[in-house]
Amino acid sequence: MGIATMIRIVLVMLLVVLTGQAQAMQFKIATLSPDGTVWMQKMREGARELAQKTDNRVQIKYYPGGVMGDDKTVLRKIRIGQLHGGAVVSGSLTKFYPDNQIYSLPLKFKSFKEVDYVRKFLDQRIIDGLEKGGFVTFGIAEGGFAYVMSNVPIRTVDKMRKQKVWIPDNDPTLLEAIKAFDVNPIPLSIADVRAGLQTGLINTVTTPPIGAVALQWHTQIKYLMDEPFLYIYGLLAVDRKAFEKISPGDQLVFREIMGRVFRDLDRLNRQDNVKALEALRKQGIEFVKVSAESLAEWSNDASAVPRRLIETGRLSREMVDTLENLLKDYRSKHSEADE
């Protein structure tokens, strides 16, 4: 056997070894979602199927219940390689693609039908934008409409201004948006909200019903302003560099399985929000109606939010205009009676 042939054999063997190393990987993924929730059940089902269909080349190890810290801490651990991804709320990824917060404009949507119509056009743009920003995602899972919940009844903007209002400490877009209401919020990590409510550091939160129940915030509030305030979603974000270490074939399997998981979660979360809203009512939380006059005041302040976010670079004018045009198109074809 000639030297050249031996070198070729060694190179082929080395390539096989390196390829195998590149393809086999365990993804470490953290989330605040407690074990036992629908989110964790579905994501674990997806992980089992992924391992099976890739002959264990691709595995997922989850860290639920905030054991790895809040979303900001999880993102820092992803950056240093301690984690590979997180199941997070959209606001946590704003700096990687600011326009991903287009759905969170206050009082922008009047119904889920409007949400569904807009998402048909903008979901993929958000997914593509986040991937360019460094995170592979697998679809958007509805968090749902968030409601203002408090220890005091809130009907007017003026009443809201007098409260100790929480906002996430890693969501600069929401921080800028709430300034339009002349509210001075108290930024806290999601993991610290329950303690903040218990101690009186804060007394007002804005969250979807399923979030309030899953994180046990509902045990600390007495009133819910019965007007959907903004729309929230979550997603599974995996570091793109880590994702690209597995083979192209395994990447496709990963995308297909977790994409299906998040389509299921998107559908199930809407159903669970209806149940959670009813659970809040049964627990004795009072649903506070907002008068037409007060709602007009809320809407007037909310109308200033898009301009503020464009001026501060938190949202692009093109994305805001696209949203406005989609809503205008939908509303021109559907009356409020259809909703």
Image: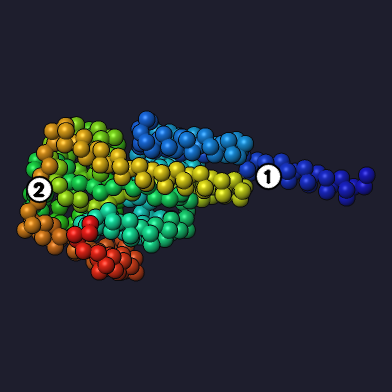
Frontmost residue, 22 versus 231: 231
Observer able to see residue 219: yes
Q: Residue at x 24, y 44 (%)?
A: 207
Frontmost residue, 171 versus 318: 318
Q: Secondary structure at mark 2?
A: loop
Q: Considering only vertical position in the picture, is 328 above or below 83? A: below
Residue marked by disc 1: 19
Label at residue 336 = none
Tell me which label, 2 or 1, sits earlier in the chain. Answer: 1
Q: Amino acid at mark 2?
A: Lys
Disc 1 crowd rating (10 Å Cα; few below 14, some 14-19, many 20+) is some
- Measured Cα–Cα span from mark 2 to mark 1: 61 Å
Display colour scheme: rainbow
Residue marked by disc 2: 289
Q: Is residue 182 left or right of residue 231?
A: left
Residue projecting furthest to the right: 1
Q: Residue at x 25, y 32 (%)?
A: 216
Quadrant location, the C terminus: bottom left
Q: Residue at x 14, y 46 (%)?
A: 225
Quadrant location, the N terminus: top right
Residue projecting furthest to the front: 338
Of the residues tagged 2 and 1, which is closer to the observer? 2
Image location (x, y in percent) of residue 101:
32, 56
Q: Is residue 274 left or right of residue 49?
A: left
Frontmost residue, 154 versus 273: 273
Image location (x, y in percent) of residue 136:
48, 51
Image location (x, y in percent) of residue 130:
43, 55
The image quadrant of residue 180 is bottom left
